[in-house]
Image (tube, coloured by chain):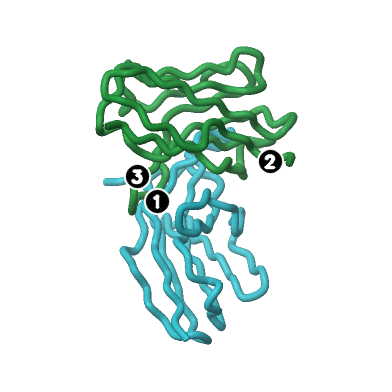
Amino acid sequence: RKEVEQDPGPFNVPEGATVAFNCTYSNSASQSFFWYRQDCRKEPKLLMSVYSSGNEDGRFTAQLNRASQYISLLIRDSKLSDSATYLCVVNMDNQGGKLIFGQGTELSVKP
Amino acid sequence: DTGVSQNPRHKITKRGQNVTFRCDPISEHNRLYWYRQTLGQGPEFLTYFQNEAQLEKSRLLSDRFSAERPKGSFSTLEIQRTEQGDSAMYLCASSPTGFEAFFGQGTRLTVV
């Protein structure tokens, strides 16, 4: 089993749609979780941190379910500019250790 | 520019040659990470440092790969006897806390 697994993509949605991405992780001791965004041929950039029961930033909401070892990212009112690959990232211990990335989920928002 | 800096941005090398990449982290970030990314995949962990100490190296990494961070500032990643399978984007990231990490633009390696 992979340490971090994400929904396979691509997701093709119309502008204004709501889309959700899921991610599961294998290490129950993991303490911190992130969503990164990566545009084509660019470096990953931090989108949101998810530290406790989840958090919201504008149109973006991240949720954490420790019991199920599952995190999600919800994007409301999708914009064309949201088209990118979304990477789920897990910190594998509680001492600020290595960050493990999922394979990414590609999102394409169409007019 | 105070972000993570990687050099060179692109490298084309012949199979069997050695290559070295450099990463300059954000000032005072004590964590530094190296990742490798191929098309359609997420970044794959290679190794990371806390200051000058290398804390972990991926089991997937062969002995041809070595990384250093001699003074706890910049880091180098060397690949010896390159193979075509080493062609990838090599990403460096730094972090002040060991949690959120900030990436450089990467070095794209092509082995011909």
Q: Which element type, helix, strand or loop, lies under badge 2?
A: loop
Badges 3 and 1, same chain: no
Badges 2 and 1, same chain: no
CB within 8 Å, label 3 to label 1: no
**Circle 2 crowding by C-alpha within 10 Å: few under 14, some 14–19, many from 20:** some
Left-right relation of B87 to A60: left
Checking the image for residue B37, the label placed there is none
Q: Nearer the viewer, residue B50 or A14?
A: A14
The residue under label 3 is which amino acid type? Thr
Q: Nearer the viewer, residue B110 or A42?
A: B110
The relative height of residue B29 versus residue B100 in the rendered view (above or below) is: above
CB within 8 Å, label 2 to label 3: no
The colour with which the image depicts chain B is green
Left-right relation of B84 to A58: left
> What chain does badge 2 belong to?
B
Task: Identify the residue position indicated by label 3 in the image.
Answer: B38
> What chain does badge 3 belong to?
B
Task: Identify the residue position indicated by label 1 in the image.
Answer: A102
Task: Of the two numbered discs 2 and 3 on the same chain, state the one appearing first in sequence.
Answer: 2
Place residue B83 in its image quadrant.
top left
Residue B111 in picture, x, y percent from top left: 30, 31
**Residue found at x 53% / y 21%:** B76
Q: How many marks?
A: 3
The relative height of residue B55 versus residue A106 in the rendered view (above or below) is: above
Residue A62 in picture, x, y percent from top left: 56, 65
The colour with which the image depicts chain A is cyan
> What chain does badge 1 belong to?
A
The relative height of residue A85 versus residue B50 in the rendered view (above or below) is: below
The residue under label 1 is which amino acid type? Gly
Task: Identify the residue position indicated by label 2 in the image.
Answer: B3
The relative height of residue B104 versus residue A85 in the rendered view (above or below) is: above
Q: Nearer the viewer, mark 3 or mark 1?
A: 3
